[in-house]
Amino acid sequence: MDPVVILILVAAIVVVFLVASTVRIVPQARRYNIERFGRYRRTLQPGLNVVVPVADRINTKLDVREQVYSSDPRPVITEDNLVVNIDTVLYYQITDPRAAAYEVADYLHAIDQLTVTTLRNVIGSMDLEETLTSREEINSRLRAVLDDATGKWGIRVNRVEIKAIDPPHTIKEAMEKQMRAERDKRAAILHAEGERQAKILTAEGTKQKDILEAQGTQQAMILRADGEAKAVELVFQAVHRNNADPKVLAYKYLETLPHLASSDNNTFWVIPGELTEAVRTVTRAFGDQPTAGPPTAAQPEEAATADADDTSDARRVPGLEAGSVVSLDAAAAADEAEKQAAAAVSDAKAEAAAAMSPQVPGRGQTSGD
């Protein structure tokens, strides 16, 4: 081969190599740190960039988009000496590629260790219950500490989230028992409240029922009393209007007397004091009939006989004094009173008939003697 051709080919290869070494294309959201003879020179931006061949070289290629880093669960001791495992999720972004490459050797490892240290400091000042219920506060304190520490590394921490908090197994069982007891307590309270409301409503309904029944009974008694009052008023008006004889009234009194003990609930019967007076009235009513002819000498004897009959009538009706109490059964007492009243009326009628009959001969002579 011709040496000239060989030289041309070698020159072409060298030119291609030099061009390839001079031009650098950086993708979007990427940053390249350039070193010249081992010293940081500049950071290449996205697009076409030209560098000095052989003198410049790319040290680090960094992604400036927001990154997500999830750490492994780490044991943390709370204030009440309980060990819990906590794992976090970290959202960060490189803002200064030069500082991220030259200020810290491994920024991910540094951020992870700083997160664990800060988390232990924060959780160490809280008890278990506060740790489980204060995630927002823990996230805010972690972000503040990490953002302040990673600022000089050219990294901005946008967000820190606690992914899980795992207490010990025994604590989980105790918490489940506590929650179960709380639920049972609330269920018992709700059940008791329901029974209480049901009893209150039932009592109110019974109360309203009793009130309405009492009002209905009251109205019925008032109407019944008004009717009885009007009936009695009409009877009295009729009696006064017709000017009834006292004899009739006395007889009606005796006729009504047995009905006083007609109820089955009566265990004793009080005989009123007017009973004897009523019997005497009936007796006088039938014994005071006018007789034909002038009075004879036998009238004193008849008066004495009448007095004796009155006395015998009083003896025939035992226990008829005013206010006396008969200790017999109510029905038996009523029957006895009815019999005594009928006997008294029969005696009175017999005496009246005897008074109207002619004088027996020799009776006046016996009286005169």
Image (tube, rainbow, N blue to C red):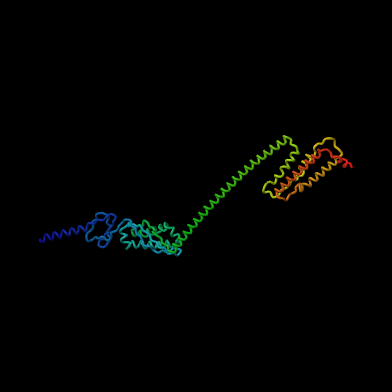
Question: Where is residue 26 drawn, in percent x and y?
Answer: 26, 56
Q: Residue at x 72, y 34 (%)?
A: 242
* Placement of the C terminus among the 4 image quadrants: top right
Question: Where is residue 260 drawn, in percent x and y?
Answer: 70, 45
Q: Residue at x 32, y 60 (%)?
A: 100
Q: Is residue 58 left or right of residue 147?
A: left
Question: Where is residue 194 drawn, in percent x and y?
Answer: 52, 52
Q: Is residue 365 left or right of residue 227?
A: right
The extreme front residue here reads: 361
The extreme right residue here reads: 369
Q: Which corner quadrant of the image does residue 215 belong to?
A: top right
Q: Is residue 137 left or right of residue 206?
A: left
Question: Where is residue 226 drawn, in percent x and y?
Answer: 65, 40
* Placement of the N terminus among the 4 image quadrants: bottom left
Pick the residue in front: 99 or 228. Answer: 228
Pick the residue in front: 129 or 310. Answer: 310
Residue 359 higher or lower than 49, as above or below: above
Q: Is residue 229 left or right of residue 344?
A: left
Q: Which corner quadrant of the image does residue 71 belong to?
A: bottom left
The extreme left residue here reads: 2
- Badge count: 0
Pick the residue in front: 266 or 200. Answer: 266
